[in-house]
Amino acid sequence: MSSHSLTGPPTRSDFSRKSVTLTESLLLLSLVSIFLPWKVYPVFFLISSFFFVRESWSIHLNKWMIALAVYVGYGLVVVGLTYSGSSQEIGNAAKLLVNPLFLVCSIHWLSKRENTRLTHFLDWTLGILLLLSLLQLLVYHASFDFRLILGSDTSGQASGLYRPGLYYWGLDDKNMFGARIALLGFVFVFIPVLQKHKLSAVRILFVFLIAFLSLSRTPMVALLIGIFALSWMILERKWRIVLLVAVAIALPFFLTQVVRIDSITSSNDGMGIRIVYWTAFFTHFSELSIWGGGFLEARDFLQENAKFYRGEPHIHNTFMTTYVEFGIIGFLAFTAFIGLFFQACLQRIGQIGMLIVLFLPILAIMMILYSGYDNDVAVYFVLIWLVGSQHAIDFHHTKIKTL
């Protein structure tokens, strides 16, 4: 166990000592910026990173930072060697630089301070972001006369909900928006467990409602995994049995109505497309360059080898995409970064059960979405550090409450 001993939840007086500082505001505004319809978040990330370093000065290099630097550095070399002049490559190169920088600077800054009060402001910020996400989704559903309010039959039908003319918040991509809702929604559910030893049923239902209305299966699966693991940590043994029975009863409905398992291998189904891409990856693995082919390699590879291709810039799996783009060196560096970051979190607080719960949603989503340099990955790891490294949680004294 680290020096961060088991403590009780903070009191209200902990949050009222003074208002939010400029640097704290920049972190919260960085979260807001990734929901804006204009791609301004790199500006917020860079300004925030400057103030993080300015306030905490010297940066102590951790092992995970070194692994991340190898991933970024090698990735930039590959990009330089394979650059074809595409604007997509320029955008991805910016992500590859800005998002890891924001991650490193944020965590260095958070490590030098006490973050209880910041978590209180984060809680309010996440609540507002999720509420605005709900309003955006209701605008989409209203344009369809709420015909899809109970779900959609196919991925194509669900994607049709996202009309560009109605987009003002979040993301205009169903899966990416759903994944963001899942990740930030799970942190929103977790914060009362950290602060008050309370798992709020209302928060869980609120986040599940938004995830369901997104018509993306990604957040539903990730949330189910995260909430199940969190509930398992909290419940006594007899109630764990009740939880298993409840999941068993609800599973058929979840698989048929939410996951749509009956159409999971269809060529017009999102999961069916993923299976085709993954099959192409493993079947033609030997044809991939071990050094990586750059940002457009996934497109070219899938066009050549997949049974069909829908135009995605990645393989719908973070680790496969990393190998395709940056080869074995990039893959090993990125994998080492994930493992070493988990180890650093564990050394900070020493509570492996809590960290597994926090890591499960992002790992679940990374298996079916994302590139390693997407901003959601960086932001969620920052939030893991923020809420997962303050103090250990006595799950046995955490209660499930209505509010």
Image (cartoon, grey):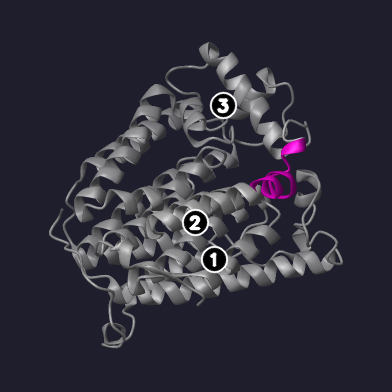
Q: Nearer the viewer, mark 3 or mark 2?
A: 2
The residue furthest top is 286
Relative to 325, is 220 on the left or the right?
right
**Mark 3: few, some, or many residues within 10 Å (few <14, many ≥20)?**
many
Query: Relative to 280, does residue 223 appear above or below in the rendering?
Result: below
Count of marks placed on residues? 3
Look at the magenta stretch and give its main secondary structure: helix
Tell me whether circle 2 and circle 1 mark residues in contact (CB < 8 Å): yes
Measuring 16% from the left and 63% from the top, which residue is drawn there? 5
Residue 221 location in percent, x, y? 58, 48
Q: Which residues are magenta?
A: 251-262
Q: Secondary structure at mark 1?
A: helix
Q: Which mark is residue 227?
A: 2
Relative to 385, is 240 on the left or the right?
right
Residue 304 location in percent, x, y? 67, 18
Quadrant position of residue 129: bottom right
Q: Amino acid at mark 2?
A: Ile
Residue 328 location in percent, x, y? 40, 22
The residue furthest front is 238
Query: Relative to 8, does residue 164 appear above or below in the rendering?
Result: above
Residue 278 location in percent, x, y? 60, 26
Q: Secondary structure at mark 3?
A: helix
- Label 3: which residue? 297
Comparing 190 with 103, the one in front is: 190
Quadrant position of residue 136: bottom right
Q: Quick one: label 3 or label 2, which is nearer the N terminus? A: 2
Q: Amino acid at mark 1?
A: Ile
Q: Quick one: label 2 or label 1, which is nearer the N terminus? A: 1
- In reply to whether residue 260 is colored magenta, the answer given is yes
